[in-house]
Image (spheres, rainbow, N blue to C red):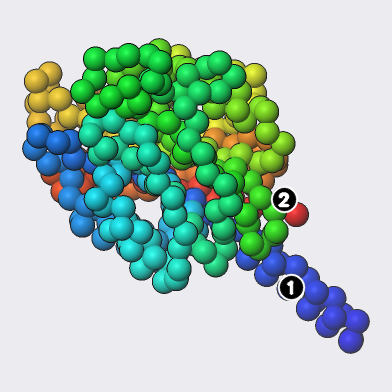
Amino acid sequence: MQRTAAFLAAAFLAVASARSEEFRLLAWNVESNRPGQPPVSDADVVASQLTELLRNPATRSQIVALSEVEPKTVERYRRAVASGLEGEVDFVTSASGGYADADSLMLVVDARRFRIDEVLELHRYAGIKANFTVDQETSSEYGSVRARSPLIAKVQDLASGRPFWLIVVHLARGEEELRVDQARVLRRWAADRSEPVVAAGDFNFDYVFATARGNAAFDAMLEGDTWRWLEPDPLVDSNWSEDRQKGPPGVDSYPGSILDFVFVANGAKGWRGTSDVVVRRGDFPDDDRTSDHRPIVATFRPAP
């Protein structure tokens, strides 16, 4: 009897330990406002929604990856995550991003579970550009480094004691050639690492459900099997795009497609990982206070 009780106690502790090491990542394009243009979102409204998501047990995430963050809203989003998680957080933001510094990337982690150890922005790697660099003149009023370079952080998992790389991504929308190069850079950079790597955010890969195809950058990302997509099941449209010049209001210009992804490479492929697009009542079509993207949440159970 004592031996059986001891066995059951050990089994319970093993299950509890495995559950404690599970974590979630929430990635969301919060949609920034452009200088001189009508507002398309309200950071206070979106931040409140973010807090609600993190307080919901189904979407509570210890890692939050945000894109299209205006520098003036960074502290608002930091507080939103801290409030949702009811604890201290660590965070970092990117320096690159066009539109007069209105388009930064932001990574926030629950400081009770993770620690950010190293940070870099991937402007160029292995001779491949991931941004418009200072030696390439552009006509943009925002300067020569105006796209969003991937924001990379080495994160220490305090539960397991093991590190991994986390990449916050918002690839180029209007420049197809640059977007393909950015995907190639991510593939090459991850292939040269030995630690697990996770990349999440708005990749602008235009993956269409009906054809099961993305654009050329999607193909470049998956070339060579360095990355594996944590494909949501079911697939859900993650972006509302309404063009009133081409169609009536309230109609999505690109239905049945997804722009937001979570990818894993190296040892992270061995983690039990899933991802889901978060659908909330009334989220689409969005209005001038809310984001035109849906959040995506990935759940990970790292291998022991």
Residue 265: % across, % down: 63, 34
Q: Which of the pair 273/87 is nearer the observer?
A: 87
Q: Which mark is residue 190?
A: none
Instruction: Give x and y (percent) for residue 231.
Output: 51, 35
Q: Secondary structure at mark 1?
A: helix
- Location of the N terminus by quadrant is bottom right
Say left or right for 193 vs 261.
Answer: right
Residue sitting at x 26%, y 52%: 73
Give the residue at x 44% y 55%: 91
The local crowd at label 2, few if under 14, some if 14 to 19, many if 20 or more residues have their Cα within 10 Å, is some
Which mark is drawn over residue 303? 2
Looking at the image, residue 25 sits to the left or right of residue 135; the answer is right
- How far apart are the two marked residues, 2 and 1, measured between alpha carbons? 17 Å
Using the rendered image of the protein, determine whether residue 277 is visible from the camera's viewpoint: no
Residue 18 in sight here: yes
Instruction: State the image quarter where residue 48 is shown.
Output: bottom left
Residue contact between numbered discs 2 and 1, judged by CB atoms under 8 Å: no
The amino acid on which the numbered mark 1 sits, given as a three-letter code, is: Leu
Q: Nearer the viewer, residue 130 or 291?
A: 130
